[in-house]
Image: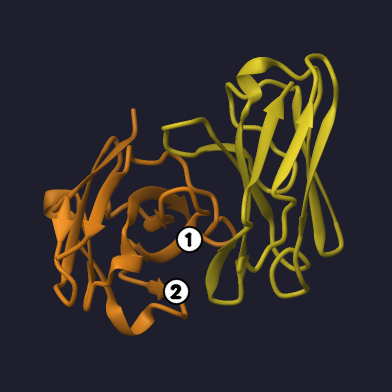
Amino acid sequence: QSVLTQPPSASGTPGQRVTISCSGSSSNIGSNYVYWYQQLPGTAPKLLIYRNNQRPSGVPDRFSGSKSGTSASLAISGLRSEDEADYYCAAWDDSLVVFGGGTKLTVL
Amino acid sequence: QVTLKESGPVLVKPTETLTLTCTVSGFSLSNARMGVSWIRQPPGKALEWLAHIFSNDEKSYSTSLKSRLTISKDTSKSQVVLTMTNMDPVDTATYYCARIGDYPDYAMFDPWGQGTLVTVSS
C-alpha cells in the first residue's frame, strides 16, 4: 500500500489531454515538492517533472505538473503512442521518500 | 555525462545477506549537495525507496526496512554499497541506484542506473 495515491490506470487517444492525480498528506505533498517519473516498458524510470512543475531539459512541453495543497497532477497534452508507460509521483515525507503506486497509461 | 551502474548477485538464498554496489561516473561522491539513493521494484509492482547517502555521510533509511539495511560509500572507488540482511522471496526485485540532490530534492532521482534484478530463492 503506497503512501501517495494514484489511479492504477488512465487512457486516452492520440492528441487528447490526460491527467494523472497523486494524493498525499500534509507531511509529504503538503510540505514538500512533488516529482514525476516515466517508466517505459522494460526500462528504468526517468525524471519527468521536478519541484512540482519544472521540466528537465529534453522533456517535451506536452508534459506539465501542478500541485495544490496535498494533491498534485501530471498532465500530458497532445497524447502520443510513445507516452504509453507507467507514471509515478514521489515526495519527501519527514524522513523518507514516498512513492505513488503508479499509473499505467494506455494510448488507445 | 553522469552514469550509475548497479552490480551484485543475480540470485540469493533466503536468510542470506545481499550486497549491491552502485558505481558512479561523471560526478564525485565527495561533491557537496549530491547523494545517491537506492530504490527497488518487485516484478509488476511499484517503486519503493530504500535509502540514501550524501557526501557528508548523512544517511536515511526506509522506516519499514531500516533494521535490515546498511548504506555506505567509498569515495575513492566512486561506489555506494547497500547491504540487506535476512533476504526473503518477497525481496525479489529490480534494484536501482540514482543520483539525488540535497534537500529539498531528496526525491529528485536523476539519472537512474539500469537496475539489477535480484531473485531470492532456495
Specify the label residue B118 is tagged with: none
**Horizontal and vertical percent position of residue B20:** 20, 57
Q: What element carries label 1?
A: strand
Distance between the Cα atoms at labels 2 and 1? 9 Å
**Horizontal and vertical percent position of residue B64:** 45, 80
Amino acid on which the number 1 mark rests in the picture: Glu
Amino acid on which the number 2 mark rests in the picture: Ser
Where A2 sits versus B69, above or below?
above
The residue to which callout 1 is attached is B48
Query: For the view shown, which residue lies furthest in the bottom direction?
Result: B67
Lower sequence index among marks 2 and 1:
1
Q: Is mark 2 on a helix, strand or loop?
A: loop
In the image, is A78 to the left or to the right of A94? Answer: right
Image hue for chain B: orange
The scheme the figure's colours follow is by chain
Where B18 sits versus A12, above or below?
below
Instruction: Kindly report which numbered mark, 2 or 1, lies closer to the viewer in this rendering.
Output: 1
Within-10-Å neighbours for mark 2: few <14, some 14–19, many 20+: some
Quadrant housing residue B19: bottom left
The residue to which callout 2 is attached is B62
Front-most of residues B46 and A64: B46
Image hue for chain A: yellow
Question: Tag 1, which chain?
Answer: B
